[in-house]
Image (spheres, grey):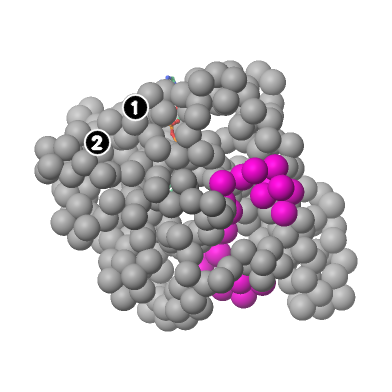
Amino acid sequence: MTIRERLRGQEPTLSFELFPPRSPAAEEVLGRTMRAIVERRPDFISITYGASGSTQGASRSVVQTVAQQHNVPPLAHLTCVNQSRDDLRAVIEGYLEDGVKDFLALRGDPPQGQTGWRPHPDGLVYASDLVRYLRDIAAAHGIDDLCVGVAAFPSQHAIPRFRQTALDVLKAKQDAGADFAITQVFYDAAEYTGLVAEAAKQGIGIPIIPEVMPLVSAQRAVRAAHVTGVSTPQDLIASLESAGSDADAHARGVDYAARLSGQLLEEGAPGIHIITFNRHDAALDLVNRLGLRR
Ligand code: FAD
């Protein structure tokens, strides 16, 4: 069953995001995390992919492990920035050979500090181009049940001068053939409901799954803002900083994420996608708090 079909179910979907490990020690941690999260029978596990294709082999290996050893549908992230069409085709065909049906089509960020960046001369420019490219390649291989997700940006939509751009870009992705979207992280349920409501008014009907990131230490909360480009709320940072112990900070961070996720589900979110940082404790405590599974 593809993610598109799972999203038609009665219950909200549960999913997690992992990233490919960068060392043997990190690989061990990832292995433990995978074993713990698959016990909750997630609908899918997404695996990030470095911009410019930097984690190509490592991402594919995690995707294979998720599918073959754990029998959970992988959602393979794919970026197109700084890659030629031929390189992308090879990566996509590799995934299709492995039986992967679900992709998250992203542009990826250009390398930091590279001024005057230009798209690859024989590459794709936007994520919507990648959606079309994925569909074309799958069709050429006779695959008609491909499922493609894209990114959506509630915090961008919440800023009046960027609002229409956020909607236009999401509409372009839907028109290119996207089946669903996963949001960038955000901390205010109203940003999500605002995006979903406006999107519906403008003919964007694809399910939009909110991404939730349990932040269980002040250090991680500060770092998250650098990684995602979304400011971590001051009240969350202050709460984590004033915690009496690591366990107290953990409980406060999970509580914050649980309250946000609970609001989102009450508002009709089609699922919750949890960023794990390749650690399972906070992610699974959040699942327990939500009573999501299983
Ligand atoms: P696009 O939709 O192509 O947008 C890129 C820029 O172009 C935006 O400024 C947009 O406004 C503009 N734009 C788009 N279409 C048009 C158009 N037709 N005309 C004019 N302007 C246009 N990054 C990674 O490197 N690896 C990952 O695994 C990864 N996973 C992610 C998962 C999620 C859920 C999210 C939300 C983000 C993820 N990212 C990842 C980050 C993402 O690659 C960046 O946010 C990137 O800057 C934008 O990607 P996009 O897919 O939205 O690109």
Q: Mark 2 belongs to which amino acid? A: Arg
Q: Which residue is mark 2?
A: 135
User: Quadrant where the C terminus lies?
Assistant: bottom right
**Residue nearer the viewer, 114 or 218:** 218
N-terminal label among 2 and 1:
2
- Magenta highlight on residue 124: no
Q: Residue at x 74, y 71 (%)?
A: 250
| Above/below status of 29 relative to 115 | below
- Specify the farthest residue to the front: 10
Q: CA distance from mark 2 to mark 1?
A: 9 Å
Q: Residue at x 82, y 64 (%)?
A: 241
Tell me the residue that label 1 is attached to: 176
Name the element at disc 2: helix
Q: Is residue 150 left or right of residue 129?
A: right
State which region is magenta.
Answer: 262-285
Q: Amino acid at mark 1?
A: Ala
In terms of secondary structure, where does tag 1 sit?
Answer: helix
For the view shown, which residue lies furthest in the left direction? 141
Q: Which residue: 55% across, 19% down?
A: 202
Against 266, is 191 above or below?
above
Task: Give residue 220's position: percent from left, percent from top.
Answer: 66, 62
